[in-house]
């Protein structure tokens, strides 16, 4: 008692009372209103001119499943190409070499500055510009044979993605403290080794959320490759409704598949983020 | 005749209009501990960074172990060395930073073996044994598997010292190694540095810890406005400075 500080009178002891839970009437009310709206929309669709049996039948049709597989194969390959190009271009952009810098800026300018669908059409119709491709005397091929819908889609989507990814990567590289480069140099590392061992692993942590965003965008952007006859899910759905005129039903089928894929990707991204958060303590030790 | 481990001759460096170093010359002898003192902006950190080529010099020359750093004389002109050659020259000196700069995505042990394994291409098992020995030497063997974010500032700086020593350098540079630390953590880092000095390591230390300089340094160099004002044995310079500017600085520090 003698060591405690002297306290003034007139302040009741609240230490035995609990803080009450608020009922939150407003939240309940808004939730009910929103449920009612959703139910009304659902009812309208159920009574609308949609043959739901077609949706169920075509959801697992082999040609649709093959379509979504093609969509995913293209998205993964184009993203891989995009990330590869993105890293290289971001490093070029931050290099002291003015030639590399200009090439990198030019690339980003060109491929971000034109519509993706236009780039896809250009790649697909490359044969109109260059009837034969190759190194004269060593190896040549007819462009029409070479530039399949698959290759045109991969180049179009991947190179376009690289232009966007390079900016994401550049932001990631810039987010790493300059002291990390210096510490890497001080133990005798060259620029590229320091990037690979020290800077990129730290940049990945920053880069993953926007990259996940980019990938989800790319999954849906593959649908543009339908214009160059790449058999992804939307293209295949279109082919079916050209034959049976069930336009809305097949668009819903494709839409459900896109939603499913994106729903699976989100938790995958979180797993990856956890992997790259190694050593980073959030909110203290 | 003996040769100095580091010979700095008429080194100048400007950052735009600001002249950070003006014709600085200094020798550091093998086994010597030299402390650089002076106000912020006096050029002491710049001089230290020039020795490790984190900053390139504008004119003059620095020799480490008899080898001219960062430059090569050919046909009466100086040419800058390429990145690979500079990286090789850096292997001879270790560096300890004010803000530790440990690699946050690696454990203490991984930080220490990174240079030996990735740069010097030594066997991981061998490097690990040596790294554990170094961590023991700085009193952190039990923290080998901790990440930097799990260590206090003083512990991080001791890991950083172990990381510098793992490269088996001939010289260790310290850039204000205790300035970013809470006061109660300064002592543990200075104790490790003292032990290192006693073991015969050549050290160039930029510091505000005049007590450490008095106790450990063989020589103290006082810099002001990019130039060396006065250099001499620690006890002489710190207790009986000859220059008025040194006296004013020391009076303000105490």
Image (cartoon, rainbow, N blue to C red):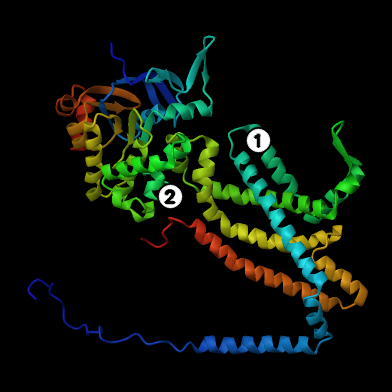
Residue at left offset 87%, top offset 38%: A140
Q: In terms of depth relative to the viewer, which is nearer, A128 or A111?
A: A128
Give the quarter of the image for residue A245.
bottom right
In the image: residue B49, left or right of residue A168:
left
Residue B18 position, x and y percent, is 43, 29
* Residue B175 seen anywhere in this rendered image of the structure: yes
Asked if marks 2 and 1 fall on the same chain, the answer is: no
Relative placement, left or right, of B117 versus A195 is left
CA distance separating discs 2 and 1: 31 Å
**Residue B226 or A93: which is nearer the viewer?**
A93
Q: Position of residue A281 (x, y in %)?
A: 41, 59
Q: Which residue is mark 1?
A: A100
Query: Helix, strand or loop at disc 1?
Result: helix
- Is residue B94 toward the left or the right of residue A95 in the image? left
| Residue lying furthest left | A2
Up/down of B199 relative to B62, above or below: below
Residue at position x 40%, y 45% in the image:
B111
Secondary structure at numbered mark 2: loop
Observer able to see residue B138: no
Q: In what quadrant of the picture does the C terminus of chain A appear?
A: bottom left
Q: Which mark is residue B48?
A: none
Q: Is residue A36 left or right of residue A113?
A: left
Report the chain holding disc 2.
B
Residue at horizontal 75%, vertical 54%?
A157
Residue B57 at what x, y percent from top left? 45, 24
Q: Chain of mark 1?
A: A
Discs 2/1, front: 2
The image position of residue A7, as x and y in percent, is: 15, 76
Q: Compare residues B16 and B211 and report the one nearer the observer.
A: B211
Disc on res. B106 = 2
Query: Which quarter of the rendering shows the N terminus of chain A?
Result: bottom left
Disc 1: CA contacts within 10 A as few (<14), some (14-19) or many (>=20):
some
């Amino acid at each position: 008692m003698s060591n405690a500080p002297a306290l003034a009178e007139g302040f009741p002891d609240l230490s035995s009372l609990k803080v009450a839970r608020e009922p939150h009437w407003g939240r309940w009310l808004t939730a009910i209103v929103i449920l009612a709206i959703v139910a009304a929309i659902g009812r309208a669709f159920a009574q609308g001119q949609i043959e739901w049996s077609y949706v169920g039948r075509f959801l697992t049709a082999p040609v649709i499943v093959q379509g979504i597989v093609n969509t995913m194969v293209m998205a993964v390959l184009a993203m891989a190409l995009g990330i590869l190009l993105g890293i290289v271009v971001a490093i070029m952009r931050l290099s002291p070499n003015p030639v590399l810098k200009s090439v990198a800026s030019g690339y980003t300018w060109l491929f971000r500055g034109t519509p993706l669908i236009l780039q896809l059409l250009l790649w697909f119709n490359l044969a109109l510009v260059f009837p034969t491709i190759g190194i004269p005397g060593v190896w040549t091929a007819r462009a029409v044979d070479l530039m399949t819908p698959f290759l045109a889609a991969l180049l179009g989507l991947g190179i376009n993605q690289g232009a966007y990814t390079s900016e994401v990567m550049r932001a990631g590289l810039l987010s790493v403290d300059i002291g990390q480069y210096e510490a890497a140099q001080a133990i005798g590392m060259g620029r590229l080794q320091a990037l690979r061992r020290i800077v990129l692993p730290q940049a990945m942590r920053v880069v993953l959320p926007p990259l996940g965003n980019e990938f989800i965008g790319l999954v849906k952007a593959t649908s543009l490759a339908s214009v160059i006859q790449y058999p992804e899910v939307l293209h295949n759905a279109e082919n079916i409704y050209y034959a049976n005129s069930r336009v809305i039903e097949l668009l819903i089928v494709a839409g459900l598949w896109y939603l499913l894929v994106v729903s699976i990707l989100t938790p995958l991204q979180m797993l990856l983020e956890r992997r790259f958060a190694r050593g980073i303590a959030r909110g203290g030790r | 005749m003996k040769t100095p481990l580091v010979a700095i001759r008429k080194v100048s460096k400007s950052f735009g209009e600001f002249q950070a170093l003006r014709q600085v010359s200094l020798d550091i002898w093998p086994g010597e501990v030299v402390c650089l003192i002076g106000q912020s902006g006096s050029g002491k950190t710049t001089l230290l960074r020039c020795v490790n080529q984190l900053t390139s010099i504008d004119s003059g020359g620095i020799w480490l172990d008899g080898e001219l750093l960062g430059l090569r004389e050919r046909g009466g002109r100086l040419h800058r060395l390429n990145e690979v050659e500079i990286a090789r020259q850096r292997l001879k000196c270790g560096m300890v930073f004010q803000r530790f700069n440990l690699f946050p995505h690696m454990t203490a042990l991984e930080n220490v073996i990174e240079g030996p394994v990735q740069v010097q291409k030594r066997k991981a098992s061998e490097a690990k044994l040596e790294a554990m020995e170094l961590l023991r030497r700085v009193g952190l063997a039990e923290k080998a598997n901790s990440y930097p974010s799990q260590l206090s500032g003083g512990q991080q700086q001791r890991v950083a010292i172990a990381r510098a020593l793992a490269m088996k350098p001939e010289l260790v540079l310290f850039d204000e190694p205790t300035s970013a630390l809470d006061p109660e953590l300064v002592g543990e880092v200075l104790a490790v540095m003292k032990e290192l000095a006693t073991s015969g390591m050549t050290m160039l230390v930029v510091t505000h810890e005049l007590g450490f300089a008095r106790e450990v340094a063989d020589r103290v160099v006082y810099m002001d406005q990019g130039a060396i004002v006065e250099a001499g044995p620690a006890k002489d310079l710190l207790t009986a400075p000859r220059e008025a500017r040194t006296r004013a600085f020391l009076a303000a520090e105490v």
